[in-house]
Amino acid sequence: MTTKKRKITTVLSLIAIFSLVATALAGCGGSENNSAGTNGDKTITWLTARPENGAIIQTVRELADRYSEDHPEFKLDIQVTADRPSYLTKLRTLVASGELPDFIDTDADPYAQELADAGMLVDMKQFLEEQGLYDQFYEPALKYQELPDGSLYLLPLEYHLEMTWYNKKIFEENNLTVPKTIDDMLTISKALKDKGITPIAVDGVDVWPVLRYAAMIPFRTTGNEFARNLSQGRAKMADDVGMQTANFVSDIGQYFQKGFASTDYTTAKNMFLNGEAAMYRMGTWEIPAFVDENLPEQLKGQVDYFYLPTINNAKTLNNEFFGNSGIGLAATTNNFDETTKDFLSYVLNNYSDVYVAKQQMSPLKFTIEDESKYSELFLRIKKDMDNYGSEFAKPWDTLLDADTNSVMSDLIIKLAMGTISPEDFAKQIDDAIAQNASN
């Protein structure tokens, strides 16, 4: 047995032991005392990795306050650990100790699959169907939360489309038009670089913005099939699609700003906002920054966007591209009593009214009655959402196992920098997957 398998077996054994202990405690009132006070008060705990002052937590707090007006015994305890690595460490510690709270945040990755397989998470598809809420969500927002085996144990609390924002003035001055194909994007980038203009500003520190470029050709070619098969060792980076991917990243990387590997999120965005780069790929969570009234004077009226260009014989439609519904919300099985169910149902039934009022796109279908309260940009993107296809491009970093993901994160930057060849990149990725995927 490999070391990795021993670790998983140990964790699952601990889970089983602690589940038995929890069951025994429940028989003598121990479990009830963890969530209820001596006066019958009910406290629901949510361990979250979201920003403390972000729109999601603000929305849930507001709904919890409303809920408690009719349920005075109810209280919501939100425990925030916004730093993702610290959050994951805390989550894994709680899993190992059998002390999971009522709600947790997790990505739809192999670790979440482990928790679901161990019976620790509530089947959210079943819950939503019971509540008559399943069809109330935007389909891509739910699909993004599906685990590697296609099951749904996580709920989205946000919904974003991802696009490339571009400087219209730079494009017009250089007689460039919005790219229709991925090859067009390379051609445009070369034309800009040849004129001394930085084509693309990218956040290399966080890696995932670079990984999005690696997922472009596979998604247009196969949908999410290649990425899923690759993560499970059923496809190789050395295959035709994989080599097209590696070559594309090597090509597009030469059009990122100098020193992109050490450029963080804010610096990359400011490069675009300061007119130092023609394009900047990000998502609808940046709508507030790109609303005309919030732009620097020299950029007012000069920012627009385009979605993922296509390729010849693409499998996916033009209205299917990158988007996400963020980190998912999971309910833990040992704590999912009638009060918890009722509160979650209340939140979901009222979520859009509060969240959208904060100029945010809800994962639950919503209509806008008074358009005067929203920016033209917000309304335009809302129409894009309503006309979206059925499937998001799945981010590779939520499909790959943790060990391979670490290797990929290191190598994708080197590939984009040109310090390793596409062939070497493919071989090292395939070696990592061969070693780790089966675990």
Image (tube, grey):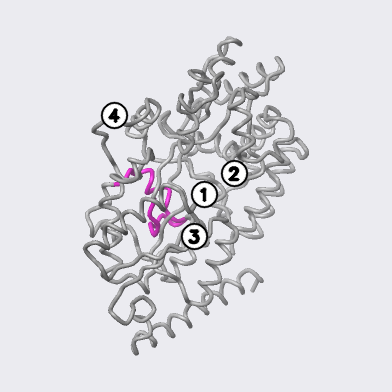
Q: Which residue was labeled with disc 3?
A: 80
- Residue at the location (72% across, 17% down)? 196
Looking at the image, do the residues carrying marks 4 and 1 touch, with CB atoms under 8 Å apart? no
Tell which circle, 4 or 1, labels the residue nearer the N-terminal end.
Answer: 1
Q: In the rendered structure, does residue 148 fall within the stretch colored magenta?
A: yes
Residue type at the position of mark 3: Val
Tell me the mark number nearer the camera, choosing from 4 and 1. Answer: 4
Front in this rendered view, residue 274 or 125: 274
Q: Nearer the viewer, mark 1 or mark 3?
A: 3
Query: Where does the N terminus fall, quadrant-wise?
Result: bottom right
Q: Main secondary structure of the magenta part?
A: loop
Q: Position of residue 219 (x, y in %)?
A: 50, 37
Report the magenta residues as a range: 137-156
Where disc 4 sits, the SS reads helix
Query: Mark 3 and mark 1 in contact (Cβ < 8 Å)?
Result: no
Query: In the rendered structure, which amino acid carries the disc numbered 1?
Result: Arg
The answer to whether residue 79 is magenta is no
- Sequence order check, earlier mark of 2 and 4: 2
Residue 354 in picture, x, y percent from top left: 31, 46
The location of residue 434, given as percent across then percent down, is 65, 57
Dot 3, how many residues are within 10 Å of its Cα: few (below 14), some (14-19), or many (20+)?
some
In the picture shown, does residue 390 fall above or below 275? Answer: below
Q: Residue furthest right?
A: 419
Q: Are marks 2 and 3 in contact (CB under 8 Å)?
A: no
Looking at the picture, tell me which residue is in the foreground, 292 or 232.
292
Q: From the image, tell me which residue sits under label 2.
A: 208
Looking at marks 1 and 3 on the same chain, the residue that comes earlier in the sequence is marked by 3
Q: Earlier in the sequence, mark 3 or mark 4?
A: 3
Mark toward the viewer: 2 or 3: 3
* Residue on which the image places disc 4: 371
Q: Residue at x 38, y 57 (%)?
A: 152
Separation (CA) of disc 3 from disc 4: 34 Å
